[in-house]
Image (tube, rainbow, N blue to C red):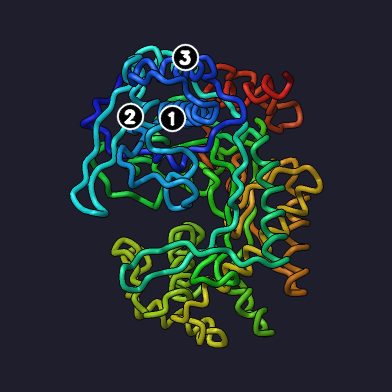
Amino acid sequence: MKITPLNMLQKTIYIKKVIPPKKSLFQAEIDLLVSQVNEATGRKNKPSLQTVSKRIQAAKLILQGLYRCHVSFSSGIALAVPHHSSFYKLGDENKIHDIGFKIVISVVETMMKLGWIKRRLGYRTSADAGETTILLATGDLLKKFEKIGLVWEEIETIPDVLVLRNYDANTKKKYRQNVPDSDLFRRMAANLRRINKYLVKQAICVFISNNSYQRLGNEMTFGQKNTLYDFNHQGKYPRYLDFTMVQLRRIFSRDNMKLGGRFYGGWWQFIPKKYRVHITINSLPTIEIDYSGLHPYMMYHLEGLKPPAGDMYNIGVWSSPKDMEMKRPIIKEFFNAIVNDEYGEYKMPKNSRKIIGLSNKQLRAKIAQKHPLIAHNFNSGYGLTLQYEDSMIAERVMLLLLKQDIPCLPVHDSFIVQVIHEKELIHAMNQAYFERFSKSIKMKSKFLYNRGPDGSRLYSIEFPLPFQVNGEVDKLALYKMHEESIHNRYVNSRRSTSSK
């Protein structure tokens, strides 16, 4: 493996974001580290049991973070570990709060002496600006990572699943508030912990070629461009691919537990959309089904109004299915943006204006003409209320499927399940929406093997397809054909771990 020089690293995984596994892949390395900390740092006194426990915790976290960098498939990504005591405070959720500064530094120094890491020290230019110290695996530790490759791990469940944020108009920064104590919010948290406890036991992956993993990793880190130094991102992606990021949090806004509340945190929510049809759950292909025109429908139903017939985003600007495929997402994004835009400042990107053939003012007028009964909600910030409504529906959908032992991955107004559970998902989505509004709503789906009206495949498939006698894809044969793929080795490692 080619090692990226530290001075070329552009993106980082912050140590505070690393979630440790239940059972570390690097127990031997942890034991060696902890046994040598005193010698490496020149300490002579025998450490207390508490100190040893904290060193083990720090070693486990740093090794896991370095490993996640290695298997992110992003060339040029490192682990950020602050080397200043101001970033550490026990009990402070906004800082590194579970292990102390001196403990972390002692483990890092020992790893340096063992030749396991390269380090680029950070610096401060002001109270809130500078560069954080970064670490990159090297030597015997890198060889160990390369030998293991990407394997499935069961991650510790997170206790903090409800997040309440507020917004400082002066500093333009969001900050956390304490979640109120009530039966409703305790129930929300308990439900989400049950969902997360279930999700961490699933192997959720993408079935693409090994070369495409490298492309996906770099697209997420640097955008969909060929060069690592072109940061003109096409979409907002996280900075790295991490299949252990399966746990969800509900994020509420404006110091109000009835604004926002959507589920965030799953890696599948943030990969470029073109890869989502390739997602698998426990090796099986998946289908994604979403509510069609969810927010417009909810706006009508919340006010007891009858929605107009047809597609909620059809404002008469497309003339063919291909034209609709290009323009409908722009109209949907614009609609949802102006509902949540309190100051009327939202503007379409230049490329979107070119595709749609309308100015911002013209598009607003056409949407208002299509939806005069709900136009009073435009530029109102009402979108956060709608997000609360769709988050409650999403919670209900996931809980209904959890009772049936069916893993379900939310993407706000859409849900991903194994294709064998398509009917159960549709039923759960219908039930959840009807329970809230006593109304029905249309849905649409995406599946890797779908074909268009002319019989051609809608999505690209990188692997050859074996077919059964009845003409259906032989999925078992498909996976056996590619046992050496990153995907299959990953899901098979989950099977071998679960059988122990």
Q: Nearer the viewer, residue 416 or 115?
A: 115
Q: What kind of element bears circle 1?
A: helix
- Tell me the mark number nearer the camera, choosing from 3 and 1: 3
Question: Dot 3 corresponds to which residue?
Answer: 32
Q: Amino acid at mark 2?
A: Leu
How far apart in space, not on screen, are marks 2 and 3 (Cα)?
Answer: 19 Å
385 left or right of 272 in image: right
Amino acid on which disc 3 is placed: Leu
Tally the numbered discs: 3
In the foreground, 479 or 117 = 117
Q: Are marks 2 and 1 in contact (CB under 8 Å)?
A: yes
Q: Residue furthest front?
A: 45
- What residue is pinned by disc 1? 62
Pinpoint residue 244: horizontal percent, then vertical percent.
55, 36
> Is disc 2 surrounded by few (<14), some (14 to 19) or many (20+) residues within 10 Å?
many
Q: Earlier in the sequence, mark 3 or mark 1?
A: 3
Kindly identify which residue carries mark 2: 135
> The residue tagged with tag 2: helix, strand or loop?
strand
Q: Is residue 212 visible?
A: no
The structure residue drawn at horizontal position 46% and vertical position 26%, both measured from the top left corner, is 59
Q: What label sits on residue 297 in the rendered view?
A: none
Q: Secondary structure at mark 3?
A: helix
Q: Where, quadrant-wise, is the C terminus in this rendering?
A: top right
**Is 448 located above or below residue 308 in the figure?**
above
Which residue corresponds to the image point at 35% horizontal and 14% vertical from the top-left? 114
The three-letter code of the residue at mark 1 reads Ile
